[in-house]
Amino acid sequence: MLPKYKEISKEIENEIISGKYNDTNKLPTVDELIKIFNVSKNTIRSAVDLLVDKGLIYQVQGSGIFIRQISKEGYINISKMNGLTKDFGAKDIKNKIISFKTLIADQYIADNMKCKVGTELYYVKRIRIIDNEPFSIEESYFNKEIITYLNEQIITSSIYDYIINGLKLSIGFADKVIYCEKQEKDETNLIGMENEDISLIIENTVYLTNGLIFDFSKSKYNYKKTKLLSLANFK
Amino acid sequence: MLPKYKEISKEIENEIISGKYNDTNKLPTVDELIKIFNVSKNTIRSAVDLLVDKGLIYQVQGSGIFIRQISKEGYINISKMNGLTKDFGAKDIKNKIISFKTLIADQYIADNMKCKVGTELYYVKRIRIIDNEPFSIEESYFNKEIITYLNEQIITSSIYDYIINGLKLSIGFADKVIYCEKQEKDETNLIGMENEDISLIIENTVYLTNGLIFDFSKSKYNYKKTKLLSLANFK
DNA sequence: AAGTGGTCTAGACCACCGT
DNA sequence: CGGTGGTCTAGACCACTTC
């Protein structure tokens, strides 16, 4: 059972996506939303704040709540915590497994996952494929003390869907480091780059709400096909 | 005059930076903060929420407020709206002007700045230099209807400092697009890359709180020296 | 059971925008 | 000046963690 403000936020988000406000690009006023949803002002403000944080709307004091039109379909949104699924909408996303095994944390992984050397991990290496075109190579490490079970079926579909809905874990936050790096050509060939050896890299450290790291991953993207999007608010 | 919750947020942030909580990595409880600052619970929560959004802390229901230790000095934080100054702390940041002129918006700029073709703009091309090493090339367009005046002195020091404190404009939010692109070698040479022709690019579209775009910029970074950091929260 | 964060209300008053 | 968002309070009750 979600709290009211999250339900309301989700409902308004759906309305925005459905195009309900496309004529004016303006949402109802706060007072109107209070009446529509029959809740207090703070509850509306919490709901609206969520959408501001997501970059969907902005508020102008004395004027109203406006839709922040961003026509960036196909960009990977690194501010949100989607996976690729939401960034590419209707497109067909598949995963090809290159490697799937358990191993134990060495010093490098232990440092990055704030766990002990020797901690048992799942290691998953996949190629992400969008509309039958290889798009990225992803290597992930999952702490087995938290992600107690994985199988081929799960990692072929959506690992995060399984973690949230299957294991009922709640994901809190993530650090993402973005940079470029030279690669061996047999790596870049996997994502459709002939005679190219530079990749765009995203290193992702993902925490549960209680602060424990359960996933550390490194994704290599074909830099010719990849644009990242980050929406920032000044507060 | 800042509202209470922003003052409190700033004060707690300073305490965190000063290392006041380094022994426990834990902040006082919400009830304690209420007594310390003598304000209501919602005011403390607003203050704390700001720090959560900044990626400085995280809250665990039933347990406490914890510091999110991130040892990423020198990374460019694209979640915040700093400018380089805060990302590189004590380091010496200089700007070398390559070009400074007024021009009028063509179709491309008009599309990106949501202004009319023909709108007057300032165009600024600078090299950003950190500790005497060229670091990035930045080309910016400022809408002259909003940024009514610029001069060489301002763009040699900090344009944003001038916009906020001089012009008293209030910056609302920004879209950032990140990608890699091949460059002419005379461009990449400017940022210390010999025989390299790939740059890491950040395109930045910056809005005032009222939703108007005043700045559109494209920065090219030496990919060998650049790591970007993005802190995301799952809500 | 005690401690700690999360949600929600009802109402007051302030600050800014546009007419 | 009316409309609209921004801040703040005091208090109630819920949900989760820790012991």
Image (cartoon, coloured by chain):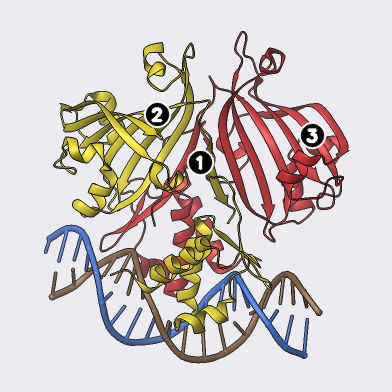
Chain colours: A red, B yellow, C blue, D brown
Residue A204, given in percent of the width and then of the height, sits at 64, 41
Circle 1 crowding by C-alpha within 10 Å: few under 14, some 14–19, many from 20:
some
Marks 3/2 in contact by CB < 8 Å: the verdict is: no
Chain designation of label 3? A
Which residue carries the number 1 mark?
B74
Residue B88, given in percent of the width and then of the height, sits at 45, 43
- Cα gap from disc 2 to disc 1, whole angstroms: 14 Å
Which amino acid does the dot numbered 3 rest on? Answer: Val
Chain designation of label 2? B
Mark number displayed over residue A124: 3
- Cα gap from disc 1 to disc 3, whole angstroms: 30 Å
Q: Nearer the viewer, mark 3 or mark 2?
A: 2
**Left or right of D13 on screen, residue B95:** left
Which SS class for mark 3? Answer: strand
State which quadrant residue B22 falls in: bottom right
Residue B69, given in percent of the width and then of the height, sits at 61, 55
Chain designation of label 1? B
Nearer to the camera, B143 or B78: B78
Residue shown at 49% from the left, 58% from the top: A50
Residue A56: tell me if it is visible.
yes
**Left or right of B124 on screen, residue B149:** left
State which quadrant residue B188 falls in: top left
Badge 1 and badge 3 in a common chain: no
Mark number displayed over residue A130: none
Which amino acid does the dot numbered 2 rest on? Answer: Ser
Which residue carries the number 2 mark?
B136
Circle 2 crowding by C-alpha within 10 Å: few under 14, some 14–19, many from 20:
many
Which SS class for mark 1? Answer: loop
Which SS class for mark 2? Answer: strand
